[in-house]
Amino acid sequence: MTACIMYLWQARHFCVTDVQSEADPVRIVSDESRSQDAQDIDFMGTDQVSEVREPTPTASGIVRRLADFDTLGDALDYAADGACGLNFFDARAANPRVQSYKALQSDARAHALRLIAMGAKPGDRVALIAETGPEFVATFFGCIYAGVLPVPLPLPTSFGGRESYVSQISNQLNSCDPMLAIAPPALTEFVAQATAHMDGVDVLGWDSFEALPAPAADLPRPSPDDIAYLQYSSGSTRFPHGVEVTHRALLANLNGHAVGVGLADEDRVISWLPYYHDMGLVGCLLSPIANQVSADYLATEDFARRPLSWLSLISRHDGTTLSYSPTFGYDICTRRISSQTRAGDRFDLSRWRVAGNGADMIRPSVMEQFARTFAPAGFNPGAFMPSYGLAEATLAVTMSRPGDGIEVDEVDETRLGGQGASADGAEAGAGRTRRLVNCGYALPGMEIEIRDHDDIVLSEGEIGRVLTRGPSIMTGYFRDPEATAACLRDGWLDTGDMGYLKGGAIYIVGRAKDMIIINGKNHWPQDIEWGVEQLPHFKAGDIAAFAITTSDGEERPAVLVQCRTSDLAERARLIATIRDRIKTMTGMSCVVELVPARSLPLTSSGKLSRSKARKMYLSGDIQPLDIAA
Amino acid sequence: MLTKDTVLPRLIEIITPFNRAGTDLNAKTTFATDLELDSLTVMDLTAEIEDEYDMLIPVNMLPDLETIGDVADAVVKIKNA
């Protein structure tokens, strides 16, 4: 392998002195100096760089069509007539692997023939480990052309956790029941481990799949109402739900997305979001394809290591940028850039037209801090574009208007009380307010209603359950009529979120009832409770897991555990064991409190009420037991 | 030729600024439970280690790296490959 080939864009270097940040003493070296240090080294994991290639152009050269196609395959066929495509940058945001839509179409058609030759029938499932790379995209579209449902599954993310990764994908594989699973060659071993108990699931690497013969065959012609793919970003890890997205629902959502951002000629999508998440897959891959836009990617794990590469990529692009992130992505950039480094010397964010916010609770203070930090780089706070959505609605339900930025509504804590979603109640006092973000207006064809617990529709300003209806709602959860019936009635999807409308815009008060969302990752309390139940001496119903919100809007998990022992040292030991267990499962540090037996509240049907337990804990009505010093 | 004996002390130096909990650092220290590092911090640390040794830790290795000793072994393995 040759040393790093200088790519055209790389010529624009940023000189940074190593500096120590006051705010964050842990940081010593900034990202850009890191990439300079490592500029000439040859590092593993990079694919053979045989030639320097220009990224695909921003202008497609064909007439823009806003996702008005019958099927996703038709959308790619049209995009392939233009010059746009996808560009996969390496860990230093350089040397893109370029995949034009034309090349993608041709690879995907060959993949479709391979699947058909393997016996794939329309409606069969193929699981794909969703690595950010051209192989995943070509295989995903190969499935689409073959009428097979691709099912993107997650990558491992961190040190340790082999067991939990394998068990997570194993649960998802069980749920989607695929004929075949295809993965990066280095990960086939994990997938084989996860499918060991299943009959007849072949596991292949991208390379061995591509080596299979692709004999000529007729490609099926899917109907717009056929399911296009399954999305597993919703539901708990242990009890996953695969969202069924039809071609019609998808394309309606992608049209809404293009209309919502006011798609412009100079726009380019830049993303580090994982393809196994709806925002990464739908918003940053399928949307650019269906709307003939070029996209530039950093792998998620590369972003996590060098987040400022994201901003470098945006700086280098000459046109305007559409780029989205959950709150923590903006947060990590603000934290990472040293206080002594002038953002204006390193970045040019003046052409970042839409800086989308979504996928978790939007924290206004984080966004304001980002805007202040990057104002010298020309960042315009009006570029912030909050949105609200969920996988069950394909992706977006509402988007704010381009240019409006973050609009905040100050709401008295007392109004939020009792909704299972108030800020840290232990500190809540009279006159305390919480700042809620305007998440925008319903996309074309989508409707929103706020209802109370008796399904009565509430008027503007009243907080209640958020329901939505329209063309991009899922048909259901794959092979799970019970879970489907629980959230989908008469065409209305119960999002599980609490919120209110004001001036036609939605304000989300609390996300998904009981869900714990930290750093953009969803943790289901059921999973955490189940993990604790597996420890000796605990049983179902002894444990309540929920999120508590600190005063700056940060979420942290808390677990209440009913305990029968009066031995103080034994209690301390239990707490340590439970904390370790949860840390191993979720990677999160959490608050663990032992509470007296029978102190956790039950619902009228005898089930644990997490929201009530949370409220009683915060108000002091449940008192934790003493432990040894 | 790198050996675990030289890599381990250097890794501990690199990890020390991340050790806010003041945990005893040795080959058996685990990232998730002993050091209580969240996944973002782990990635930050990963970048530090990669830059120190001019290498990239492949994604398929990460799930098996539970302890500082595991990382030292991985560094030795990659660098001597």
Image (cartoon, grey):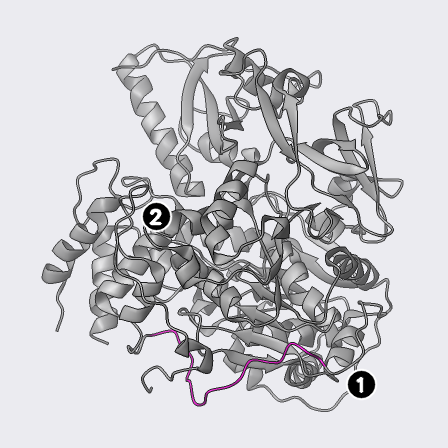
In the foreground, A180 or A356: A356
Q: Main secondary structure of the magenta part?
A: loop
Q: Would you name the residue on which mark 2 appears?
A: A339
Q: In front: A414, or A139? A: A414
Give the residues in magenta: A44-60
Q: Nearer the viewer, residue A339 or A396?
A: A339
Residue A323: quadrant of the picture:
bottom right
User: Would you say residue A496 sits in the magenta stretch?
Assistant: no
Q: Is residue A50 magenta?
A: yes
* Above or below, comparing residue A334 to residue A132 in the picture: above
Viewer-nearest residue: A567 or A442: A442
Q: Are marks 2 and 1 on the same chain?
A: yes
Residue B35 in the figure: left or right of residue A182: left
Image coordinates of residue B73 in percent, x first then y, are 21, 62
Q: Which residue carries the number 1 mark?
A: A218
Chain under callout 2: A
Taking the spot 66% from the left edge, 21% from the top edge, the residue there is A416
Q: Which mark is residue A461?
A: none
Q: Amino acid at mark 1?
A: Asp
Q: Residue at x 66, y 79 (%)?
A: A84
